[in-house]
Amino acid sequence: MAESHGASIELENLTKRYPGSAQPAVDSVNMEIGAGETVIFVGPSGCGKSTTLKMINRLIEPTGGRIRIGGEDVTDIDAVKLRRKVGYAIQSAGLFPHMTVAQNIALVPKMLGWPKARIRARVEELLDLVGLDPGEFHGRYPRALSGGQQQRVGVARALAADPPVLLMDEPFGAVDPITRDHLQDELIRLQRELHKTIVFVTHDFDEAIKLGDRIAVLRERSHIAQFDTPEAILTNPADDFVSGFVGAGAALKRLNLTRVRDVEMGDYPTVTLDTPLQEIFNRLRGSGTNEILLLDKRGRPYKWLRRGDLMRARGSLARAGTLVHDTVTRDATLRDALEAVLTDNAGRVAVTGRRGEFIGVVDMETLMNSVHELLEADRLEAMEHQHELQEARADRTHAEQEGEEGEQKA
């Protein structure tokens, strides 16, 4: 694994009181976040999770307590300088509408006095990193971008000066579910490459499970109900409050912990627009499948072609087949893949790489086997837990009996 480029964060008795309020908005939060770790704050509306996040870069000034980043106490240093060292991404991207994409991304490096050539190279590097073609998006204005594209630019801007810490306040909350899934996958991929320390606020527990190395489930005033790995919270919630967040179907939620890259992908016959029809027939006949995947010029999934489609093609693939509407990336969760498969009657989904290129196919059988394995693991764990409870009860009964016998002898 590459060396971490993040920085540790320590919150010590971090508190925020607003004038006129009987109770603090945030009350003595203590937390240690490791360098390169992704930590998710999740909790009910008004519990103080966004306030806690904003105190880390002092967009909201703490009333009490300390903040250390990389061991340095940042509570008393210049707040503006601190914010230039901490990336910040919010819901709806928060881009400046009168600035181009490139100007938005270049904002902090420009403030830091970077040379123009370095800024230009950094903007191109970041656009490529978040999956946007620099040549196509460099000069566009935010109004000409989709919601998902705006969020990508927002993440690029937050990363522009290469900060060790990235704060994200419900950054994907305003986009549609499909775009949100893709943005989450993109963040997972970016984190595997960059190893930043990410603190991420969400109200969506499924998003927390998917993204977090650890999750802090927060009560009112940001009191920590449980701070643990997604696996531990799903299998051993600390109390009824945490159980309420986990909700029903913990085994299915655990599908958010397994990535498509962790399961076996099927090798699938593919052809391109330049492949002669006869060769397509031959490949289909020799593949043992009833369909073949047509790729576009960039190697991306384009159409599913069945034998009947080819019979009707009459020498041209232009009108043949069914367009590929949904794909998943290698970083998508098995839950994402299951949803994609269920929306397609053919029972499979194409898996793509960083630039959308075709990698393989995941089918319903593979996904169902994974679900059964998770359910079986949950069943065995529940049996083991029940056995431990029975043993503890038996030991307690035995001790009570021995105590009673001792009293009778006395």
Image (cartoon, rainbow, N blue to C red):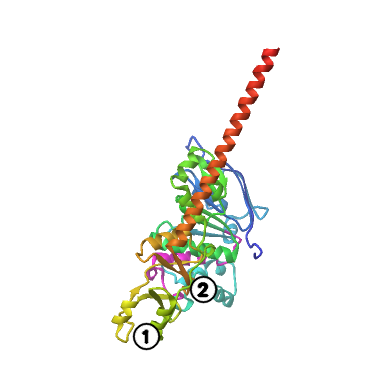
Residue 10 position in % (x across, y down): 63, 49
The structure residue drawn at horizontal position 57% and vertical position 37%, both measured from the top left corner, is: 387
Residue 65 position in % (x across, y down): 61, 44
**Residue most toward the right?**
410
In this figure, which residue is indicated by the disc labeled 2? 128
Q: Is residue 380 left or right of residue 1?
A: left
What amino acid type should be assigned to the residue bearing mark 1?
Leu
Examine the image and state in which quarter residue 290 appears: bottom left
Q: Residues within 10 Å of mark 2 (few under 14, many from 20)?
A: some
The structure residue drawn at horizontal position 44% and vertical position 47%, both measured from the top left corner, is: 249
What amino acid type should be assigned to the residue bearing mark 2?
Asp
Secondary element at image label 1 = helix
The magenta region covers: 137-165
Residue 229 position in % (x across, y down): 57, 50
Residue 31 in the image: above or below residue 191 = above
Of labels 2 and 1, the one closer to you: 1
Residue 139 is covered by the magenta coloring: yes
Residue 48 position in % (x across, y down): 49, 45
Which of marks 1 and 2 precedes in the sequence?
Answer: 2
In this figure, which residue is indicated by the disc labeled 1? 277
Pick the front one: 87 or 331: 331
Residue 223 in the image: above or below residue 365 = above
